[in-house]
């Protein structure tokens, strides 16, 4: 009876060796590093951001940054903490951007007109639905003139067209808006 040949056993490769292989262009080694460290980094990112949607984006950004900077890694054995540092920098940028956006949203909310009557809000919503159907060439002059209060010459300058073109486009927009909001008369 012949002895069965043992199947080859995969020998775990340490991070330092995988980093060497990645530096040499081995994409399988990079995939191995990703699978080895992604779960840990995902946990870190989630706990830092508190938001599930941010995790995948930050992970992708982290590994892209790592791949482009892998030659700068001084201690390949410290790969996990290096990756975590990249992820933390990415999270920091994301949180700073989120904070700026919240600030801007609050600032806009303070100066935005509020429709106190639900009927008025419905009319505003209907108007914006109609505006969505207009081409930018007709929508922009109409909004600049009727909503922003710009003069016709100012609208012509802002849109970089002649005064006659602005008048024609505003009239075209008014006709479409009137037809959609009030029906054919």
Image (tube, grey):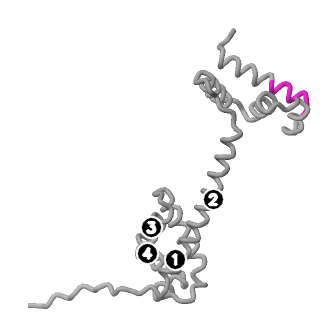
Indicate which disc, 1 or 3, sits on the residue closer to the N terminus. 3
Quarter of the C terminus within the rendering: top right
Q: Marks 3/2: CA distance? A: 20 Å
Q: Marks 2/1: CA distance? A: 21 Å
Q: Is residue 167 magenta?
A: yes
Residue 162: name its quadrant.
top right
Determine which residue is flagged by label 1.
83
Indicate which disc, 3 or 2, sits on the residue closer to the N terminus. 3
Which element carries disc 1, helix, strand or loop? helix
Determine which residue is flagged by label 2.
97
62 vs 12: above or below:
above
- CB atoms of marks 1 and 4 within 8 Å: yes
Q: Is residue 163 magenta?
A: yes
Point out residue 46 in the picture as x, y percentages from the top left corner. 46, 63
Which element carries disc 4, helix, strand or loop? helix
Q: Marks 1/3: CA distance? A: 11 Å
- Report the predominant secondary structure element of the magenta stretch: helix
Which element carries disc 2, helix, strand or loop? helix
Residue 174 vs residue 53, the one in the foreground? 53
Residue 40 vs residue 69, the one in the foreground? 40
Indicate which disc, 1 or 4, sits on the residue closer to the N terminus. 4
Which element carries disc 3, helix, strand or loop? helix
Indicate which disc, 4 or 2, sits on the residue closer to the N terminus. 4
Q: Crowdedness of circle 2 by 10 Å Cα count: few (<14), some, many (20+)?
A: few
- Of tags 3 and 2, the one toward the viewer is 2
Q: Which residues are magenta?
A: 162-170
**At x 77% / y 34%, what residue is drawn?**
140
Indicate which disc, 3 or 4, sits on the residue closer to the N terminus. 4
- For residue 37, the mark is 4
7 vs 184: above or below:
below
**At x 59% / y 84%, what residue is drawn?**
71
Determine which residue is flagged by label 3.
42
């Amino acid at each position: 009876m012949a002895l069965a040949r043992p199947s080859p056993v995969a020998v775990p490769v340490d991070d330092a060796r995988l980093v060497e292989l990645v530096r040499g262009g081995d994409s399988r080694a990079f995939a191995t590093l990703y699978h080895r460290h992604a779960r840990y980094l995902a946990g870190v990112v989630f706990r830092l951001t508190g938001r599930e949607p941010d995790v995948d984006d930050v992970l992708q950004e982290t590994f892209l940054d790592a791949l482009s900077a892998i030659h700068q890694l001084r201690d390949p054995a410290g790969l996990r903490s290096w990756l975590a540092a990249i992820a933390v920098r990415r999270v920091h940028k994301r949180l700073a951007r989120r904070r700026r956006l919240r600030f801007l949203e609050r600032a806009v909310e303070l100066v935005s007109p509020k429709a106190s009557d639900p009927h008025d809000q419905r009319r505003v919503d209907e108007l914006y639905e109609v505006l969505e159907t207009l081409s930018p060439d007709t929508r922009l002059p109409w909004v600049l003139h009727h909503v922003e209060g710009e003069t016709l010459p100012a609208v012509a300058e802002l849109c970089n067209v002649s005064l006659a073109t602005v008048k024609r486009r505003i009239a075209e927009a008014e006709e479409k808006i009137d037809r959609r909001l009030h029906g054919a008369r």
